Image: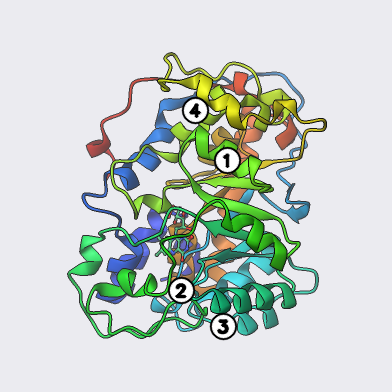
Amino acid sequence: LGVQDVRPPLTTQKFAEPMLSKIAWAYYASAGDDEITKVANADAYQKVQFRPRILRKVAEADATTEILGKPSRIPVFISPAAMAKLGHPDGEVNLTKGAGNTGIIQCISSNASCSLEEMTAARSPSQPLFFQLYVNRKRDVATDLIKKVERLGMDAIFLTGDAPVGGKRERDLRLKGEFEGPAGGVSEKSDATQGVSQAMFAGVDPDLNWEDIPWIKTLTDKPIIVKGVQCVEDALLAYKHGAAGILISNHGGRQLDTTRPSLDVLLEIRKYAPQLFRPQFRGPTGLSKDLLEHPEQLTAADPRGEKEERKFEIYVDGGVSRGTDVVKALCLGANAVGVGRGFLFAQSVAGVQGVEHAVGILEQEILLALRLLGANKLEDLRPSMVEVKEKRPNPFLRT
Ligand code: FNR
């Protein structure tokens, strides 16, 4: 299989499946229960249609941006996904090198199968790295991990809030193989009689809550992003507790099944908390009906009363498979998007080259979409460049 054949990410999946072990495939591809949210995440992008502008001088186009002040070649980062070694012997180091070579940012999972030292050693000079944190119920273990992340010079902490316990991933559960816990410092060794997923959550503290954010802030000055936000109330709580931003995510559909697709949550947050977005995204959302029963309750956490507006970044992940998906999310106010499985599959198929190739294709697609939409750069993107259709396509059409 030549690397030229790799297409991100839906078709990387097609190439990866026959190459992966049964355990790896079940762990990577699986999602909660009937995998309805996993499918819905991708489908949600189909209900957004472009409204292009023409005759706008688009010979020059630029997809570069900054994420938390760090340069990124495209508005896409690698969402933290555990156990890359299940797909390729070099595992997460492929992601580190691929990200470094192309100029995008990797968010490292707490349950990475390579050690943090291996990944930071593979980092190119001044390459930014983010770290995803699962908080161990033994707080001294969690403290040591946060201090280590700080010591190794990572640039941000993504605190995952949607996984107090693991979802019911049935494909994974069916393969109750022998499996050893990862090296990230969170999970304890497990015999994996419950499948890979459940082994991942052995040490995670289900009592983690908003009041723990101030505690984490005593251990690190790095910006904290709350990962797994699925409604506007929690977006506002993240702001209120001093987060630098949120990653709207349902964990790629792997936790509570039949939750709403991430893109719908982005629309909800823009509708009810436009003040969290940059000024050009505070206009109409395209949503036709109210989703909230008591929107007045939101004012309790409304930051509008603050003297100075704090910078707050909003990311989204789940089901992003094309440059057009990325551009749609940005038109709707996201600062950047994350891709999880796409990069796991790309590194499984072709290691570092697979990651580079995936980034290259996404970049070409994003630049093409920008030009055909009448935009030269990401700051030109506006809600008026898309229309959000209420009617969903049939999910069974996309398999
Ligand atoms: C994940 N995800 C995840 N999230 C997290 O916070 N910590 C983790 O360790 C993992 N591990 C993990 C493993 C695998 C195999 C997958 C597929 C996902 C969720 C991940 O960060 C992200 O939210 C989703 O993958 C995004 O959806 P897509 O891009 O896979 O559709």
Q: Amino acid at mark 2?
A: Ala
Q: Residue at x 68, y 47 (%)?
A: 242
Pair 2/3: label in front: 3
Q: Residue at x 32, y 68 (%)?
A: 27
Kindly identify which residue carries mark 3.
Answer: 115
Return the x and y of residue 307 as percentages of the image width and height.
Answer: 82, 30
Q: Nearer the viewer, residue 238 or 225?
A: 238
Q: Amino acid at mark 1?
A: Leu
Return the x and y of residue 303 as percentages of the image width and height.
Answer: 69, 31
Kindly identify which residue carries mark 4.
Answer: 268
Kindly identify which residue carries mark 2.
Answer: 84
Marks 1 and 2, how far apart at CA:
32 Å
Q: How many marks?
A: 4
| Tag shown at residue 237 | 1
Q: Amino acid at mark 4?
A: Glu
Marked residue nearer the N-terminal end (2 or 3): 2
Marks 4 and 1, how far apart at CA:
15 Å
Please report contact status of discs 2 and 4: CB closer than 8 Å, yes or no.
Answer: no
Choose top left, top right, bottom left or bottom right for residue 314. Answer: top right
